[in-house]
Image: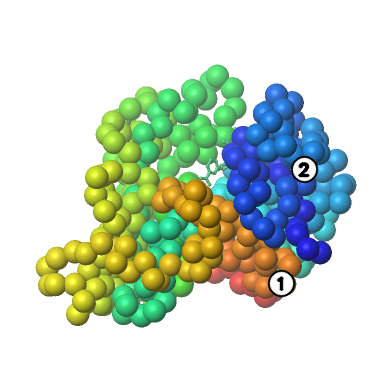
Amino acid sequence: MQRVKIGVLGAGRGAGLARTMQQAPSAELAAVCDADEARLANAVAATGVGRTYTTYEAMLDSDVDAILVASPMPLHVEHSVAALRAGKHVLSEVTAATSLEQCWELLGAVRDTGRKYMMAENYCYMRPWSVVLGMVRAGLFGEVYYGEADQIQEFKGGFPRPDTGYNWRTAELAMRQGHQYITHNLGPLYWAFGERVASVACHGSGQRHLPWAKADSTCVVLCETVSGKLLRIRLDFFSDRPNNYMYLGLQGTRAAYEAPRAGNEDHKVYVEGRTPRGAWQSLWDYEEHLPDAWRRMPADQVNDNHDGGAALMIEDFARCILDDTKPAVDVVDALNMTAPGLLSELSRQRGGAPVDVPEFRREG
Ligand SMILES: NC(=O)c1ccc[n+]([C@@H]2O[C@H](COP(=O)([O-])OP(=O)(O)OC[C@H]3O[C@@H](n4cnc5c(N)ncnc54)[C@H](O)[C@@H]3O)[C@@H](O)[C@H]2O)c1
């Protein structure tokens, strides 16, 4: 197999990733599937893909090697498990699952089938964060012990009222407490810390904007990792204020990093022994720590947005199949990034009491 033939399920977000896939040398966009024919037509226009399906079963019966699952969040496990059991590898959109039962079902299916499963957490691949990760791996941060992330993204208009029909965003994000979309924030931190969250505690502000919504306008999730390190994550889809949904911060024994809070700020680091005490310097002074894969990206495709590294993510997925290596975000990583968000809901319902997060193991 020279390139991995990928079939895309879902032509909303999936259509965008199908286009990005064409920049990943080891991946081949083989087909797109959506029950909505108008969306399919748009995907064909945007990508030139030659094959389309209106039923998922037909795409699973075809010769594609892998499925990109970009269906609504609560269907990711159903669609991933069906693909795995049909002998396909899976790249699943975030989050991996919407309940703990689904987490265990997904883990079982990956173990049973031995197929590759990767979660498509694009925030792990952002260019500035890739420099930070390179610095962590080179030892410049010493031991990392605190991380933070904010998903502040005013989205009130994107949640139709629940009495107007089913909408997954309303059902999963507006009608549930805690941080159900946590992988964008926890994913990058998990890569920096290299260990899972053992317990979560969540407090909320109450809902101040949409009278029918159950989610808090703002909630904060505190995570403790297995070795006692601390993460603080804020979710806010409702407040009237400028967005800041790519904010990340990291503190180690020898260095600190903060992403911009506003558009006119730079990414900044303090590195013990290199930056004058009490000052910041630009993260880009450390650009040598950017992975080689980023350097090979054509200049016109390089950007620092949340999807800037999506082609590298898809390439990683294709390479793990071709080289038979561990996926960059395998099923255990995906569940470690997802389950703390699911359990933050329980903590919020218990008045912020800490809730233990189960350990997901690669071997049975
Ligand atoms: N990583 C990111 O930055 C990012 C951004 C947006 C969305 N997403 C994720 O992508 C997923 C999809 O988001 P969206 O906005 O495109 O949702 P959407 O509801 O707009 O689109 C989902 C599509 O899947 C199709 N579909 C569902 N089940 C199907 C089936 N069995 N057969 C054929 N077609 C089927 C629907 O017809 C629909 O067109 C979500 O889980 C979301 O979390 C991720």
x, y (%) of residue 36?
Answer: 72, 27
- Side of 340 where 217 appears, left or right: left
Disc ID at residue 107 = none
Contact, mark 2 vs mark 1 (Cβ under 8 Å): no
Left or right for 233, reference 300: left
Image location of residue 30, percent across then percent down? 77, 47
Q: Residue furthest top?
A: 164
Residue 31's label in the rendered image is: 2
The percent coordinates of residue 44 (x first, y second) are: 72, 33
* Residue at left offset 51%, top offset 50%: 301
The answer to whether residue 16 of the structure is visible from this angle is: yes
SS category of the residue bearing label 2: strand
- The foreground one among 44 and 326 is 44
Task: Give the CA distance from mark 2 to mark 1.
Answer: 23 Å
Judging from the image, what secondary structure is the residue with disc 1 in?
loop
The residue pinned by badge 1 equals 323
Q: Amino acid at mark 1?
A: Asp
Q: Nearer the viewer, residue 5 or 165?
A: 5
Q: Quadrant of the N terminus?
A: bottom right
Determine the residue positioned at 24% across, 45% down.
264
Q: Nearer the viewer, residue 83 or 293?
A: 293
